[in-house]
Image (cartoon, grey):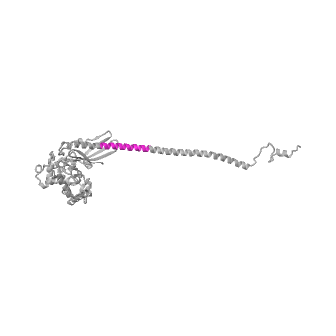
Amino acid sequence: MERFGRGDSARLWDTGGNPPGAEQPDLCPRIQSSVRPTTRLNATMQTRPANFQNGSVLIVTLVVLSLISAMAGRIVYQARLELRIQQHVNALTALRALARGGAHQFASFLRVHVEDSSNGPPAEWWTDTTALQAIGTESAEVVIYSGTPSDVEAAQDSLNGDTTVESSAEDEPTEHGLVDAESRLNINTATQEQFMGFPGFSNILAEEIIRYREELSGTTSDEDEQAVAEESSDSQSEDNSPVQYVGTPFRSIDDLLAVPDMTEEILYGHVQDIDGAPADFLTCCSNGKINLNTAPHPVLVAAGFSPEEANVLAAERRSGRLFKDLSISGSVLPEIDEERWTRLLKSITVRSSTFPVTIHASNTRNDQKLGLFARIFLRESDAQFVSWKEI
């Protein structure tokens, strides 16, 4: 039997007692088992940051794209909105230009007759519809009305109403044509007695109107009468006195509602005796006098004529007569006493100077509309706008 030394034994046998060439067992199974999961965890930890980074990039990209989309949508919306606003402004500017053109067309028509010493319905041009011809374009239309917006509304209501008015008009023909402010009593120049000429205007109410008017203007009735006397001292008739526009201190009929004791029922209530409301026969803007050729019966009576004298003047007009001067006392009418005739001369004329005009402009392609109201005043040799506003 071959003997081995200690050195050979150490060389041939390992520490575990296994012969040479045998498979080496795991020295530390527990350590081996703990190393393998740690290796897999390290690999997983190395993979997760890359996936997390890719997901973060994707989320950021989506957020950025969402913000860009929102900003782009907002920009598009603003662009469309600005375009619509600009289109609206352009259309409104075009309507405003057409409305102004209609007002100037009306003024040009009146300017032709500025030197006429008398005017009214008997004059042929008074009923000429040339001044009221509609104008427009392919997308807009302008309609011209002679009168205030309330006059236009009342005329449209009468056209849409029943036909009983037409049957009663046979007895007393209605005067058609232009609407003038001198056919009404000016509340800025009317006296207390003239206010009392309307139903419902008591002497107390008329006195309150005068007092309130003086407060607004800062003058007294004595000063007003003195100013009127100075204006007429150089001439004996209206024909030689300068024509002046009177539109203050009352700037609208509604201003009368601020007068103590004045009510809407008194001012706007229908009165059978005058076939209308007192407000229908009043104005705030005119030359301060009434035109014998255009003033209706209630206004003539309020100015100082008797009901019988007013009937005679109305009958003369219906026959086609145009009063060309104020020489009616002792000719058209019985002789009027000097004191009353002097008062009447301060309140009457045969020439209208103030013509209100209402313009309605509309876009035929949409519902856009524009209203314009203006007053045109005829001086001795020219016509000018004295008021202008959009409605």
Q: Is residue 176 above or below residue 343?
A: above
Q: Is residue 205 magenta?
A: no
Total labels drawn: 0
Horizontal side of 39 relative to 176 (left or right) equals right
Residue 128 placement: quadrant? top left
At a point 30% along the width and 46% down the height, the residue shown is: 371
Residue 138 placement: quadrant? top left
Q: Position of residue 200 (x, y in %)?
A: 21, 57
Q: Position of residue 296 (x, y in %)?
A: 19, 50
At a point 14% along the width and 52% down the height, the residue shown is: 309
Q: Nearer the viewer, residue 386 or 323?
A: 386
Q: Position of residue 61 (x, y in %)?
A: 53, 44
Q: Nearer the viewer, residue 309 or 287?
A: 287
Q: Is residue 81 magenta?
A: yes
Q: Is residue 33 visible?
A: yes
Residue 365 placement: quadrant? top left
Residue span colored magenta? 76-99
Q: Position of residue 179 (x, y in %)?
A: 22, 47
